[in-house]
């Protein structure tokens, strides 16, 4: 999983500098627990099959001294492009799936937000 994260960071055209951040926070999730919680509270359903290993929820630039997150990216800054999907699409679906919806929408939302 570390290899895919490093590959993504190197491959993607990140348009701002990480020099103003102290570290990158990797958030992972256990899909079975996430899905059980969502189903229990009736807010969402999960796509089948539910992965049986930890998956990535996000990778966020962070600071030790500032609690705020980075500003959202401009709306025209899309994560999902044909080059990334062609090369990493199947791997992204395994390691960074949207458990309750469309993967591309989820990836773009996380990219813009963080």
Image (cartoon, rainbow, N blue to C red):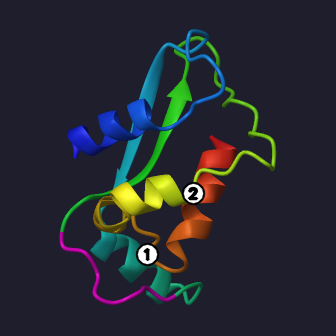
- Name which residue lies at 24% across and 59% down: 54
Q: Is 25 on the left-hand or right-hand side of 1? A: right
- Name which residue lies at 69% across and 29% down: 70
Image x and y of residue 29, in percent: 35, 58
Q: Is 49 on the left-hand or right-hand side of 64? A: left
Judging from the image, what secondary structure is the residue with disc 2 in?
A: loop
Looking at the image, which is closer to me, 86 or 50? 86
Rate crowding at label 2 as few (under 14), some (14 to 19) or many (20 or more) other CA atoms within 10 Å.
some
Whether residue 65 appears in magenta in the rendering, the answer is: no
Q: Main secondary structure of the magenta part?
A: loop
Image x and y of residue 92, in percent: 36, 60
Image x and y of residue 39, in percent: 46, 88
Q: Among all residues in the image, which is located at the extreme right?
A: 75
> Where is the C terminus found, in terms of image quarters?
top right
Looking at the image, which is closer to me, 55 or 82? 82
Q: On the image, which quarter does residue 21 sit in?
A: top right
Image x and y of residue 105, in percent: 62, 68
What residue would you read off at disc 1? 99
24 versus 56 height, above or below? above
Q: Is 30 on the left-hand or right-hand side of 19? A: left
What residue would you read off at disc 2? 80
């Amino acid at each position: 999983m570390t290899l895919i994260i490093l590959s993504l960071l190197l491959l993607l055209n990140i348009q701002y500098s990480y020099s103003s951040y102290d570290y990158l926070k990797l958030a992972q999730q256990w899909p079975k627990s996430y899905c059980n919680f969502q189903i229990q509270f009736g807010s969402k359903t999960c796509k089948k099959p539910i992965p049986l290993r930890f998956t990535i929820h996000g990778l966020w630039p962070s600071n030790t001294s500032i609690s705020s997150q980075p500003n959202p990216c401009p709306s025209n800054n899309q994560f999902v492009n044909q080059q990334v999907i062609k090369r990493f699409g199947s791997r992204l679906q395994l390691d960074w799936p949207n458990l309750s919806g469309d993967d591309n929408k989820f990836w773009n939302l996380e990219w813009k937000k963080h």
